Image (cartoon, coloured by chain):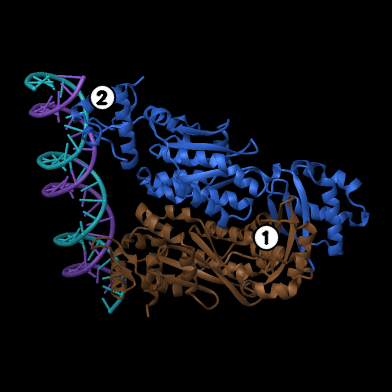
Chain colours: A brown, B blue, C cyan, D purple
Amino acid sequence: MLDERKQKILQAIVDDYITSAEPVGSRSISRKPGMGLSPATIRNEMADLESLGYLEQPHTSAGRVPSPQGYRFYVDCLMRPQKISDREVALITNWYETKVKNIEQVFQETVKMVSRMTRNVSLMVAPAPAKSLFKYVQFLPLDERRAIVIVVTDSGFVDNKVIDIPEGTSFHDLQEIANGINNHLAGLSFDQIKTSLLKEAKQDIMANPVLFEAALSVLRQALVVEGGERVYLGGTTQLLNQPEFREVEKIKGLLSMLEEEQLLCDILHMQDGDGVVVTIGQENKYSGIQDCSMVQATYRVEGQVIGTMAVLGPTRMEYGKIITVLEFMHRHLGDILKKYKL
Amino acid sequence: MLDERKQKILQAIVDDYITSAEPVGSRSISRKPGMGLSPATIRNEMADLESLGYLEQPHTSAGRVPSPQGYRFYVDCLMRPQKISDREVALITNWYETKVKNIEQVFQETVKMVSRMTRNVSLMVAPAPAKSLFKYVQFLPLDERRAIVIVVTDSGFVDNKVIDIPEGTSFHDLQEIANGINNHLAGLSFDQIKTSLLKEAKQDIMANPVLFEAALSVLRQALVVEGGERVYLGGTTQLLNQPEFREVEKIKGLLSMLEEEQLLCDILHMQDGDGVVVTIGQENKYSGIQDCSMVQATYRVEGQVIGTMAVLGPTRMEYGKIITVLEFMHRHLGDILKKYKL
DNA sequence: TGTTAGCACTCTATTCAAGAGAGTGCTAAC
DNA sequence: GTTAGCACTCTCTTGAATAGAGTGCTAACA
């Protein structure tokens, strides 16, 4: 275990490096107020910290840089989580109130907000609409040949699509079809609906068998809800501000990774459990982000873990700030989602 | 006017530069099949073309680079617009059929597709929903205290929001309110609705005056359709692939510009008329993109120009390809939009 | 015994000159 | 009118020299 002075120095080094992105020399630590030690003493301690594995030296005559182990210790023991100010809380609340009108927008705006607050890329997996339960469909007239179909899931997702009205079907017929569908399929998952659709439909749904063909056609158009979980991504341009991504090549690599929804899903699913988790550099299982760190948090609705959100950035990230923000979202996002019914 | 040989050489130079991004020397032009001229001859012609203003030399011993005037001439006279292959047409058609279900998605997917086909940033202004005419609202039950309100405009935009049901209002009441609203406000623009709302409401809308307060509250929540035109943006990461944006600083500048919706709107509105227009470098009125070129096209529904789409990239862009793609979209986007009712 | 000043040492980043390479313009021959 | 040849120009790369930052070690000090 590190003695108190070593901890203090390590903390100063990490703090300094996080803001400056430059290897930290003994002089600059010595100069910090409250340190009260000469550069030479600091140097001795730094040499110790290096041989203990907490620091690294890019080359002999450079300052020190935190090692992954150094960051780990910093995150676990040294870092002081920043408080979220009342002003920030007010800002967040206001943001949701003015910009968010439905569930979809909760996700869209949350990633935007988080990326802005943390100055890093932020991502979020939303539960798959297809996994939730079908609640009802409703047809709205558009013109003679087409209608809008609104599909609502029990979790509050709303999907709208324009469909062709089958030949010879009146709008009144459509409403009857909707009733049939709603009566018989409400409460089923979309997966169930897909498989059992044809059989069920034939036997039960339609009081009026003349409408059967029309109903089938409509069902097929209406009930295909976009399959998988959706990943929301925000603040990718923040990457450009990080000195570690000064070379376009590195950004390209990360960005093209961030475009692969499935991959992101997988990465975010690697963490289970509940709460805020930090993975630093090589701790990340996916090799494409092993020079990055990720702070992840689950969010819950009524105790149930529903999904994950995360902030991705260079290992030299503002852990304190980011953890605080995600901790906050972890606790409060559920309430916000519930407002729009999830 | 340039004689035929000069034109041929200029064309070869621009073509070469567009693909290589390197100043073009006399040798490489001379080597091109069908050229049949020695480097020395080419050099003479190049010198002429330079003094005529069609070419520039980064420095004495470099090859030539097209000047803005050179690009202009290339675009106006030399460039052969590429045909869109049947395969591409099929791809586009299929893209819309599988990925697009409503108007919103037409815009989202169009910018994606165009940016992919042109390998450049693509943008598009959609007509402001608020400018279109209110068609109807419909309430859908969510739970006891909340409902989903669906607002449909005559142009086919569908907006859904979760609203609080006013205290003491039954779902049946809501439907009555919807009827009142629909009967009296259908066909009005949202601007009109906003201003005339209170007066009108009081006098006419509500058959049942008891519901008046509730109706007002609901109206306020429901009928605020996001104000301005929306800008859709696609393929910003394409910037990273362009050699002219190898330095992060340049990308940052452009990207931060691309984040300002209003600015983009203004830029796209500077072009009027109908059809495909190319603005090269300094021809752009906004100084932030004066080292870029932009190809813009309007799109129409039933003859009416409805909005603009554009491709933005370095002046060294594949004009032939891009113009062809936008020409195609210019002609066909209207049909696609009409399918979802605009 | 812990701390510190001093100094030699190491490594990077910058600067500068030299040389290679690419391309031109001009001249003279075809 | 076209082209081969050649001197010339400018950039980019390479390598050496130098300044700068920071270290590690030693010896002195409290």
Q: Determine the residue positioned at 71% across, 52% down.
A: A145
On screen, A13 above or below C19?
Answer: below
The reply, left or right, for residue A116 in relation to residue D6 is right
**Residue at disc 1, secondary structure:** loop
Counting from the top left corner in percent of width and height, residue B253 is at 45, 44
Residue B342 image label: none
The reply, left or right, for residue D17 in relation to residue A294 is left
The crowding category of the residue bearing disc 2, from other C-alpha atoms within 10 Å (few below 14, some 14 to 19, many at least 20), is some
Which chain does the residue under circle 1 lie in?
A
Q: Quadrant of residue A153?
A: bottom right
Q: As shown in the figure, which amino acid type bears the numbered disc 2?
A: Glu
On screen, B18 above or below B101?
Answer: above
Q: As shown in the figure, which amino acid type bears the numbered disc 1?
A: Asn
User: Which of pointers 2 and 1 indicates the residue nearer the eye?
Assistant: 2
Q: Quadrant of residue A31?
A: bottom left
Same chain for marks 2 and 1? no
Q: Tell me whether circle 2 and circle 1 mark residues in contact (CB < 8 Å).
A: no
Between residues B244 and A235, which one lies in front from this camera angle? Answer: B244
Q: Would you name the residue on which mark 2 appears?
A: B45
* Disc 2/disc 1 C-alpha distance (Å): 64 Å
Whether residue B169 is visible: no
On-image quarter of the C terminus of chain B? top right
Q: Determine the residue positioned at 74% across, 62% down.
A: A138
Between residues D3 and A31, which one lies in front from this camera angle? Answer: D3
Q: Determine the residue positioned at 85% across, 49% down.
A: B183
Counting from the top left corner in percent of width and height, residue A228 is at 55, 68
On screen, A121 above or below B326?
Answer: below
Q: Would you name the residue on which mark 1 appears?
A: A102
Counting from the top left corner in percent of width and height, residue B170 is at 86, 64
Which chain does the residue under circle 2 lie in?
B
Between residues B107 and B85, which one lies in front from this camera angle? Answer: B85
Whether residue B320 is visible: yes
